[in-house]
Image: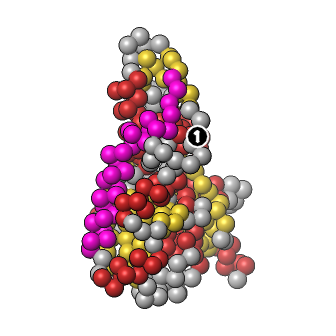
Protein backbone atom coordinates (compact mmCIF):
# COMPACT_ATOMS: atom_id res chain seq x y z
CA UNK A 1 0.00 0.00 0.00
CA UNK A 2 2.90 2.35 0.80
CA UNK A 3 4.26 2.04 -2.73
CA UNK A 4 0.81 2.66 -4.21
CA UNK A 5 0.51 5.81 -2.07
CA UNK A 6 3.84 6.98 -3.44
CA UNK A 7 2.55 6.77 -7.02
CA UNK A 8 -0.92 8.15 -6.37
CA UNK A 9 -2.17 10.92 -4.14
CA UNK A 10 -5.73 11.58 -2.98
CA UNK A 11 -6.60 15.18 -2.24
CA UNK A 12 -9.79 17.05 -1.36
CA UNK A 13 -10.06 20.63 -2.61
CA UNK A 14 -12.41 23.37 -1.45
CA UNK A 15 -11.94 25.63 -4.47
CA UNK A 16 -13.36 28.86 -3.09
CA UNK A 17 -13.73 32.34 -4.55
CA UNK A 18 -11.72 33.83 -1.66
CA UNK A 19 -9.68 30.89 -0.29
CA UNK A 20 -8.61 27.47 -1.51
CA UNK A 21 -8.12 24.71 1.05
CA UNK A 22 -6.50 21.36 0.22
CA UNK A 23 -6.80 18.34 2.51
CA UNK A 24 -4.46 15.35 2.21
CA UNK A 25 -4.36 12.40 4.65
CA UNK A 26 -7.02 14.10 6.87
CA UNK A 27 -4.80 17.16 7.33
CA UNK A 28 -5.16 20.67 5.93
CA UNK A 29 -1.96 20.94 3.89
CA UNK A 30 -2.78 24.14 1.96
CA UNK A 31 -4.93 27.08 3.06
CA UNK A 32 -4.24 30.00 0.74
CA UNK A 33 -6.09 32.93 -0.85
CA UNK A 34 -7.43 32.06 -4.35
CA UNK A 35 -5.20 34.42 -6.28
CA UNK A 36 -2.26 34.28 -8.72
CA UNK A 37 0.27 36.90 -9.82
CA UNK A 38 1.32 36.67 -13.48
CA UNK A 39 3.98 38.52 -15.49
CA UNK A 40 2.19 40.24 -18.37
CA UNK A 41 5.07 40.10 -20.87
CA UNK A 42 5.82 36.36 -20.55
CA UNK A 43 2.63 34.96 -18.98
CA UNK A 44 4.83 33.32 -16.31
CA UNK A 45 3.35 32.72 -12.86
CA UNK A 46 5.27 34.73 -10.27
CA UNK A 47 3.34 33.87 -7.12
CA UNK A 48 0.33 31.91 -5.90
CA UNK A 49 -1.77 32.31 -2.74
CA UNK A 50 -0.51 34.44 0.17
CA UNK A 51 2.46 35.80 -1.80
CA UNK A 52 0.20 36.90 -4.65
CA UNK A 53 -2.30 38.34 -2.14
CA UNK A 54 0.43 40.61 -0.74
CA UNK A 55 0.97 41.99 -4.27
CA UNK A 56 -2.76 42.57 -4.90
CA UNK A 57 -3.48 46.25 -5.51
CA UNK A 58 0.26 47.12 -5.34
CA UNK A 59 1.56 45.92 -8.72
CA UNK A 60 3.30 47.79 -11.52
CA UNK A 61 2.20 47.42 -15.14
CA UNK A 62 4.18 44.24 -15.88
CA UNK A 63 2.55 42.24 -13.08
CA UNK A 64 -1.16 41.49 -12.81
CA UNK A 65 -2.93 39.70 -9.99
CA UNK A 66 -5.88 37.53 -10.96
CA UNK A 67 -8.58 35.96 -8.84
CA UNK A 68 -9.54 33.06 -11.14
CA UNK A 69 -12.90 32.39 -9.45
CA UNK A 70 -15.83 34.75 -9.48
CA UNK A 71 -19.18 34.01 -7.84
CA UNK A 72 -18.00 30.52 -6.93
CA UNK A 73 -17.17 29.49 -10.51
CA UNK A 74 -14.06 29.64 -12.69
CA UNK A 75 -13.91 32.95 -14.56
CA UNK A 76 -10.33 32.64 -15.84
CA UNK A 77 -9.60 29.08 -16.98
CA UNK A 78 -5.86 29.54 -17.55
CA UNK A 79 -5.22 31.28 -14.21
CA UNK A 80 -7.31 28.65 -12.35
CA UNK A 81 -5.17 25.87 -13.81
CA UNK A 82 -1.95 27.68 -12.78
CA UNK A 83 -3.36 28.28 -9.32
CA UNK A 84 -4.42 24.65 -8.74
CA UNK A 85 -1.05 23.42 -10.04
CA UNK A 86 0.86 25.88 -7.81
CA UNK A 87 -1.12 24.89 -4.73
CA UNK A 88 -0.65 21.16 -5.39
CA UNK A 89 3.11 21.79 -5.55
CA UNK A 90 2.88 23.25 -2.02
CA UNK A 91 1.83 19.82 -0.70
CA UNK A 92 5.19 18.20 -1.60
CA UNK A 93 7.65 21.05 -2.18
CA UNK A 94 10.59 18.60 -2.03
CA UNK A 95 9.30 16.03 -4.50
CA UNK A 96 11.13 16.99 -7.68
CA UNK A 97 11.62 13.69 -9.56
CA UNK A 98 8.09 12.92 -10.62
CA UNK A 99 4.53 13.92 -9.80
CA UNK A 100 2.19 11.25 -8.43
CA UNK A 101 -1.12 10.72 -10.24
CA UNK A 102 -3.83 12.64 -8.43
CA UNK A 103 -7.33 11.65 -7.37
CA UNK A 104 -9.29 14.81 -6.50
CA UNK A 105 -12.65 15.54 -4.91
CA UNK A 106 -13.58 19.17 -5.52
CA UNK A 107 -16.60 20.93 -4.08
CA UNK A 108 -18.78 23.11 -6.31
CA UNK A 109 -21.73 25.48 -5.70
CA UNK A 110 -25.14 23.79 -5.92
CA UNK A 111 -26.43 26.31 -8.48
CA UNK A 112 -23.62 25.59 -10.97
CA UNK A 113 -24.35 24.92 -14.67
CA UNK A 114 -23.02 21.95 -16.68
CA UNK A 115 -20.60 24.25 -18.55
CA UNK A 116 -19.21 25.59 -15.26
CA UNK A 117 -18.86 22.00 -13.95
CA UNK A 118 -16.92 21.10 -17.08
CA UNK A 119 -14.57 24.07 -16.49
CA UNK A 120 -13.77 22.82 -12.95
CA UNK A 121 -13.15 19.28 -14.25
CA UNK A 122 -10.96 20.47 -17.14
CA UNK A 123 -8.88 22.79 -14.91
CA UNK A 124 -8.26 19.93 -12.45
CA UNK A 125 -7.33 17.51 -15.26
CA UNK A 126 -4.94 20.03 -16.84
CA UNK A 127 -3.36 20.51 -13.40
CA UNK A 128 -2.56 16.78 -13.31
CA UNK A 129 -5.64 14.98 -11.93
CA UNK A 130 -6.21 11.44 -13.14
CA UNK A 131 -9.66 11.16 -11.54
CA UNK A 132 -11.90 14.11 -10.63
CA UNK A 133 -15.02 13.85 -8.48
CA UNK A 134 -17.34 16.75 -7.68
CA UNK A 135 -19.47 17.28 -4.56
CA UNK A 136 -21.96 20.07 -3.87
CA UNK A 137 -20.85 22.61 -1.25
CA UNK A 138 -23.90 22.42 1.09
CA UNK A 139 -23.57 18.62 1.19
CA UNK A 140 -19.83 18.87 1.94
CA UNK A 141 -20.58 21.47 4.65
CA UNK A 142 -23.21 19.16 6.23
CA UNK A 143 -20.74 16.26 6.32
CA UNK A 144 -18.03 18.58 7.70
CA UNK A 145 -20.34 19.83 10.48
CA UNK A 146 -20.96 16.21 11.49
CA UNK A 147 -24.56 15.78 10.33
CA UNK A 148 -25.62 12.27 9.29
CA UNK A 149 -26.74 13.20 5.78
CA UNK A 150 -28.22 9.77 5.03
CA UNK A 151 -30.86 9.70 7.75
CA UNK A 152 -34.51 10.59 6.95
CA UNK A 153 -34.22 13.89 8.79
CA UNK A 154 -34.33 17.40 7.35
CA UNK A 155 -31.36 19.69 8.00
CA UNK A 156 -30.89 23.20 6.66
CA UNK A 157 -27.35 24.29 5.81
CA UNK A 158 -26.31 27.81 4.84
CA UNK A 159 -22.80 28.16 3.45
CA UNK A 160 -21.81 31.82 3.02
CA UNK A 161 -18.56 31.85 1.08
CA UNK A 162 -16.71 34.52 -0.87
CA UNK A 163 -18.71 34.43 -4.10
CA UNK A 164 -21.94 32.57 -3.32
CA UNK A 165 -24.31 31.86 -0.47
CA UNK A 166 -25.61 28.30 -0.68
CA UNK A 167 -28.81 27.46 1.14
CA UNK A 168 -29.92 23.83 1.07
CA UNK A 169 -32.27 21.46 2.84
CA UNK A 170 -30.70 18.01 3.05
CA UNK A 171 -32.35 14.66 3.79
CA UNK A 172 -31.72 11.01 2.85
CA UNK A 173 -28.33 11.78 1.30
CA UNK A 174 -29.64 14.34 -1.17
CA UNK A 175 -30.45 18.02 -1.55
CA UNK A 176 -34.25 18.32 -1.40
CA UNK A 177 -34.39 22.01 -2.21
CA UNK A 178 -31.69 24.60 -2.58
CA UNK A 179 -31.16 28.24 -3.32
CA UNK A 180 -27.81 29.54 -4.52
CA UNK A 181 -27.37 33.31 -4.69
CA UNK A 182 -24.35 35.27 -5.80
CA UNK A 183 -24.32 37.54 -2.78
CA UNK A 184 -21.64 36.69 -0.21
CA UNK A 185 -18.35 37.83 1.34
CA UNK A 186 -17.07 39.62 -1.79
CA UNK A 187 -20.26 41.72 -1.90
CA UNK A 188 -19.75 42.67 1.75
CA UNK A 189 -16.21 43.83 0.85
CA UNK A 190 -17.37 45.93 -2.13
CA UNK A 191 -20.23 47.40 -0.01
CA UNK A 192 -17.59 48.61 2.47
CA UNK A 193 -15.48 50.13 -0.35
CA UNK A 194 -18.53 52.01 -1.74
CA UNK A 195 -19.60 53.18 1.72
CA UNK A 196 -16.15 54.61 2.48
CA UNK A 197 -16.19 56.48 -0.84
CA UNK A 198 -19.71 57.87 -0.40
CA UNK A 199 -19.75 58.56 3.32
CA UNK A 200 -16.16 59.49 4.14
CA UNK A 201 -14.76 60.61 0.76
CA UNK A 202 -11.93 58.14 1.18
CA UNK A 203 -10.74 55.71 -1.48
CA UNK A 204 -9.67 52.31 -0.09
CA UNK A 205 -8.52 49.11 -1.79
CA UNK A 206 -10.04 45.64 -1.65
CA UNK A 207 -7.54 44.37 0.93
CA UNK A 208 -8.28 47.28 3.30
CA UNK A 209 -12.04 46.71 2.91
CA UNK A 210 -11.46 43.03 3.75
CA UNK A 211 -9.56 44.05 6.91
CA UNK A 212 -12.43 46.35 7.96
CA UNK A 213 -14.88 43.47 7.46
CA UNK A 214 -12.79 41.18 9.68
CA UNK A 215 -12.02 43.77 12.38
CA UNK A 216 -15.38 45.58 12.73
CA UNK A 217 -17.80 43.77 10.41
CA UNK A 218 -21.24 43.17 11.95
CA UNK A 219 -24.78 42.25 10.91
CA UNK A 220 -26.50 44.08 13.80
CA UNK A 221 -26.08 47.56 15.26
CA UNK A 222 -26.43 46.14 18.79
CA UNK A 223 -24.13 43.20 19.58
CA UNK A 224 -22.55 41.65 22.68
CA UNK A 225 -18.79 42.25 23.04
CA UNK A 226 -18.56 44.99 20.37
CA UNK A 227 -15.12 45.41 18.74
CA UNK A 228 -13.23 48.70 19.24
CA UNK A 229 -13.33 51.30 16.43
CA UNK A 230 -10.89 50.57 13.63
CA UNK A 231 -8.43 53.02 12.02
CA UNK A 232 -8.79 53.02 8.22
CA UNK A 233 -6.11 54.43 5.94
CA UNK A 234 -6.81 55.45 2.35
CA UNK A 235 -6.66 58.27 -0.17
CA UNK A 236 -8.72 61.41 0.37
CA UNK A 237 -10.83 61.87 -2.76
CA UNK A 238 -10.86 65.66 -2.47
CA UNK A 239 -7.14 66.33 -1.90
CA UNK A 240 -5.56 63.06 -3.07
CA UNK A 241 -3.54 62.93 0.16
CA UNK A 242 -3.46 59.74 2.30
CA UNK A 243 -5.55 60.08 5.46
CA UNK A 244 -6.89 58.12 8.44
CA UNK A 245 -10.46 57.84 9.71
CA UNK A 246 -12.02 55.76 12.48
CA UNK A 247 -14.99 53.48 11.74
CA UNK A 248 -17.29 51.69 14.17
CA UNK A 249 -19.05 48.35 13.82
CA UNK A 250 -22.45 50.16 13.74
CA UNK A 251 -21.45 52.00 10.55
CA UNK A 252 -20.40 48.73 8.90
CA UNK A 253 -23.62 47.03 10.04
CA UNK A 254 -25.59 49.79 8.26
CA UNK A 255 -23.56 49.50 5.06
CA UNK A 256 -23.90 45.68 4.91
CA UNK A 257 -27.63 45.74 5.63
CA UNK A 258 -28.85 45.45 2.01
CA UNK A 259 -26.62 42.50 1.10
CA UNK A 260 -27.53 40.62 4.30
CA UNK A 261 -31.24 41.31 3.59
CA UNK A 262 -30.82 39.57 0.19
CA UNK A 263 -29.39 36.48 1.93
CA UNK A 264 -32.29 36.54 4.41
CA UNK A 265 -34.80 36.68 1.55
CA UNK A 266 -33.12 33.68 -0.10
CA UNK A 267 -33.31 31.75 3.21
CA UNK A 268 -37.05 32.50 3.49
CA UNK A 269 -37.54 31.40 -0.16
CA UNK A 270 -35.77 28.10 0.56
CA UNK A 271 -37.94 27.58 3.66
CA UNK A 272 -41.07 28.21 1.54
CA UNK A 273 -39.99 25.50 -0.94
CA UNK A 274 -39.35 22.94 1.83
CA UNK A 275 -41.82 20.01 2.05
CA UNK A 276 -43.91 20.22 5.27
CA UNK A 277 -42.45 17.08 6.90
CA UNK A 278 -38.94 18.48 6.50
CA UNK A 279 -40.09 21.88 7.78
CA UNK A 280 -41.18 20.13 10.96
CA UNK A 281 -37.67 18.61 11.25
CA UNK A 282 -35.97 21.98 10.67
CA UNK A 283 -38.10 23.50 13.43
CA UNK A 284 -36.49 20.98 15.78
CA UNK A 285 -32.94 20.87 14.34
CA UNK A 286 -32.56 24.57 13.46
CA UNK A 287 -30.28 26.10 10.84
CA UNK A 288 -26.53 25.47 10.51
CA UNK A 289 -24.18 28.19 9.24
CA UNK A 290 -20.82 27.51 7.59
CA UNK A 291 -18.34 29.43 5.43
CA UNK A 292 -16.30 32.55 6.17
CA UNK A 293 -19.35 34.85 5.87
CA UNK A 294 -21.00 33.16 8.86
CA UNK A 295 -18.28 34.64 11.10
CA UNK A 296 -19.78 38.13 10.65
CA UNK A 297 -20.66 39.32 14.15
CA UNK A 298 -24.35 38.95 15.00
CA UNK A 299 -25.32 37.26 11.73
CA UNK A 300 -26.61 34.14 13.50
CA UNK A 301 -28.80 36.29 15.80
CA UNK A 302 -30.14 38.31 12.87
CA UNK A 303 -31.09 35.18 10.86
CA UNK A 304 -32.61 33.64 13.98
CA UNK A 305 -34.74 36.75 14.60
CA UNK A 306 -35.95 36.74 10.99
CA UNK A 307 -36.76 33.01 10.73
CA UNK A 308 -37.76 32.41 14.41
CA UNK A 309 -35.53 29.31 14.31
CA UNK A 310 -32.41 28.41 16.29
CA UNK A 311 -29.22 29.12 14.31
CA UNK A 312 -25.89 27.36 15.00
CA UNK A 313 -22.48 28.33 13.62
CA UNK A 314 -20.28 25.37 12.65
CA UNK A 315 -17.07 24.78 14.54
CA UNK A 316 -14.28 26.34 12.44
CA UNK A 317 -16.80 27.49 9.78
CA UNK A 318 -14.07 28.47 7.28
CA UNK A 319 -12.98 24.85 6.95
CA UNK A 320 -16.32 23.02 7.36
CA UNK A 321 -16.73 22.53 3.59
CA UNK A 322 -13.11 21.39 3.17
CA UNK A 323 -13.47 18.95 6.11
CA UNK A 324 -16.62 17.47 4.56
CA UNK A 325 -14.90 17.16 1.18
CA UNK A 326 -12.02 15.33 2.90
CA UNK A 327 -14.43 12.92 4.63
CA UNK A 328 -16.23 12.25 1.33
CA UNK A 329 -12.86 11.51 -0.32
CA UNK A 330 -11.81 9.13 2.43
CA UNK A 331 -15.17 7.30 2.35
CA UNK A 332 -15.69 7.37 -1.42
CA UNK A 333 -17.49 4.02 -1.39
CA UNK A 334 -19.94 5.14 1.28
CA UNK A 335 -20.60 8.53 -0.35
CA UNK A 336 -20.43 7.47 -3.99
CA UNK A 337 -24.03 8.64 -4.49
CA UNK A 338 -22.83 12.18 -3.58
CA UNK A 339 -19.63 12.47 -5.58
CA UNK A 340 -19.86 12.29 -9.33
The residue at the point 47 percent across, 58 percent down is: 300
The residue at the point 47 percent across, 13 percent down is: 241
Q: Is residue 117 visible?
A: no
Q: Nearer the viewer, residue 284 or 187?
A: 284
What residue does disc 1 label? 227
- From the viewer's perspective, tell me whether residue 215 is left or right of residue 4: left
Q: Say above or below: 250 vs 260.
A: above
Residue 282: x %, y % from top left: 41, 77
The residue at the point 55 percent across, 58 percent down is: 318
Q: Say above or below: 299 vs 125.
A: above
The residue at the point 43 percent across, 62 percent down is: 304
Inspect the magenta stretch and tell me whether residue 271 lies in it.
yes
Q: Residues within 10 Å of mark 1 (few under 14, many from 20)?
A: some
The magenta span reads 245-273
Q: Say above or below: 8 vs 66.
A: below
Q: Is residue 29 visible?
A: yes
Residue 290: x %, y % from top left: 50, 62
Amino acid sequence: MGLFNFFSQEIAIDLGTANTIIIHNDKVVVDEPSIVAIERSTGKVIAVGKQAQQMHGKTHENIKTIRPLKDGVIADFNAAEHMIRGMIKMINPNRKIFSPSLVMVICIPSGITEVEKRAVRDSAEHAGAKEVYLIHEPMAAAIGIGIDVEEPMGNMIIDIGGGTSEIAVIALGGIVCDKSIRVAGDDFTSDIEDYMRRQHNIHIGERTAERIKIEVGAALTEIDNPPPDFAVHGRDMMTGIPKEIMVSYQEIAHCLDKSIAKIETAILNALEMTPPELSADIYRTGIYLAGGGSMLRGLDKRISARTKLPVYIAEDPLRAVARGTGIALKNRDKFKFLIR
